[in-house]
Image: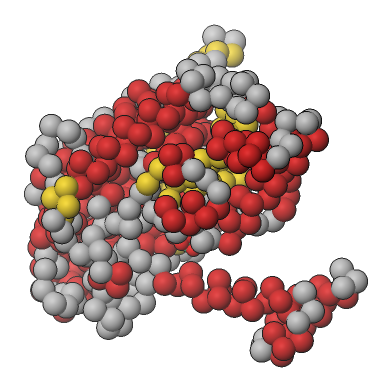
Amino acid sequence: MTNSPVDPTSTTAWSALKGHIQDLAADRIDLRTWFAQQPTRVRDFTLGVADLRVDLSKNLVQTETMRLLVALGGEVQLKSQIDAMFAGRHINVSEDRPALHTALRRSTSQPPLIVDGQNVSAAVQGEQDRFLGFAEDVRHQRHLGITGKALTTVVNIGIGGSDLGPAMVYRALAAYHGPIQARFVSNIDPSDLGETLATLDPETTLFIVASKTFTTLETMTNGRLARAWLLEMLGARGIVTSASSAAEAVAKHFVAVSTATDKVAAFGIDPVNAFQLWDWVGGRYSVDSAIGLPLAISLGPDVFRDFLAGFAAVDAHFSQEPIERNVPALLGLINVWYVNFWDARTHAVLPYSQDLGRWPAYLQQLTMESNGKSVRWDGTPVTTSTGEIFWGEPGSNGQHAFFQLLHQGTQLIPADFIAFANPSVPLVDSSQDVHELLLANFIAQSSALAFGKTADEARAEGTPERLVPARVFTGNRPSTSIMAPALTPSVLGQLIALYEHITFVEGAVWGINSFDQWGVELGKALASQVVPALAGDQSAFTQLDQSSQAMVEYCRAARQR
Ligand code: F6P
């Protein structure tokens, strides 16, 4: 890597892509025509990585487009940027550290990874053995609650990357749940913790306080409240009666995951019950670290290892394949094509899987916290648009809500459709396999978006002339279809790694650091000034802007404070 990012807009490939889109438009951009002209289009544009089948054919790309996008990847030194990430170079420049989430799932058969003189592989393996061993202790009732009862509920208290990954995976792998249920508390809204605590038995609950920094307001507040609740409930039952029994209760019912072992100890959690991650793991890239502890407990270490193996399979592909056959690279480059050459502002993610209900929320942090940047890694302004807005909902629900805009709205919204050939829960209705109804919708929607319906076709269906314009579907609305045989732990790991790397590729083209998140800081700092103002501190109040002051006054009046 050089000392400043390559400006993608000054590359030869960028200029060629600008010319190319005009050539395509002059010739007419029409997927019906393109499919007719190229009978092998699906074969030519379908790729495979691990268990994932990725069909790019319904994107607004031709073979020449892909050639130019690969050339763009070459000019921005994508391959050497990928190599730098895997090797542990300090690509997170603003925080002067590597981005080494790939080390968390690196196969033990690979040579150890040494970074900055440290054996990262050994550290990862040691910590993984510890937290998976603890998970086994809880599952096999070797680690019990203070009264000797088995722990039956694990409550993860964390937010952002310390919540979204485990919560998404827990829901996605519902078919693999064991007898210990997991719950997730993230929000500072008291309803979140309050409603969860109301359902819990303190004697059979294990709390995991998950925070990379162990300073996050929401997590620290909820963690303290949960600890106070535990001690109060156990006190009311005559179980906690002294400082030592309180310490024993915390030791039995609280564990932590963090980089900040000193802060964990100050919270009152025994270092023996603290599991580590490292500053080189971004929160949104951490589900495969000890942040996955609730998963290891509820799904079991074997499932967790299968999950990690899925990541590793995609990592191997991403690190080794040349860009022209590299699936995450090609998907990332196609996203750049839409953002920068088609002015696409948003990107829909549409899992045809109820189990992936939290997938869009998870992806929003991964993609938008990574690539929502206006400066490049050397501090200079970006030279083009970055960071599309990712959003979505599982299908088929979305079809009955927002798909109208996808089909007939005025914006170009690339969509990723995701589906699994086999269901997690098989159901049959009057001899109809219900999962096939889901798959039929998955297949039909991307077809409708791509090929549309002409006015003549609408007329041929008997549509009255006055309704023809409203019943025309323009088509040429791009999508990628990602399929796998089933939503297994490995496939889920593959999907996450795929999107992590797509995100990286986009950031690499734009020359931004996808691994910091300074944009979250200002609001946090201002909130700490608003807190005393809400509590009546006049000097804090006067520091606030006019609008904030008015809202503080409104709250104080409505709350009669
Ligand atoms: O404020 C954003 C953020 O720092 C995310 O990047 C992170 O995942 C989340 O907060 C939680 O941080 P922590 O794990 O340190 O509590």
| Residue lying furthest right | 560
The residue shown at (18%, 68%) is 17
Dividing the picture into quarters, in which one does residue 84 lie?
bottom left
The residue shown at (59%, 10%) is 430
Q: How is the image coloured?
A: secondary structure
Q: Nearer the viewer, residue 307 or 190?
A: 190
Q: Quadrant of the N terminus?
A: bottom left
Horizontal arrangement in the rendering, residue 346 relative to residue 102 (left or right): right
The residue shown at (70%, 47%) is 228
Residue 30, placed above or below residue 380? above
The residue shown at (44%, 44%) is 271
Task: Tell how many labels.
Answer: 0
Residue 465, placed above or below residue 514? above
Q: Nearer the viewer, residue 460 or 82?
A: 82
Residue 429, placed above or below residue 532? above
Dividing the picture into quarters, in which one does residue 282 lie?
bottom left
Q: Nearer the viewer, residue 137 or 492?
A: 137
Q: Is residue 398 visible?
A: no
Q: Nearer the viewer, residue 206 or 437?
A: 206
Q: Is residue 247 visible?
A: yes
Q: Position of residue 198 (x, y in %)?
A: 75, 38
Q: Position of residue 7 (x, y in %)?
A: 19, 77
Dividing the picture into quarters, in which one does residue 20 lie?
bottom left
Q: Position of residue 464 (x, y in %)?
A: 61, 47
Q: Position of residue 190 (x, y in %)?
A: 72, 53
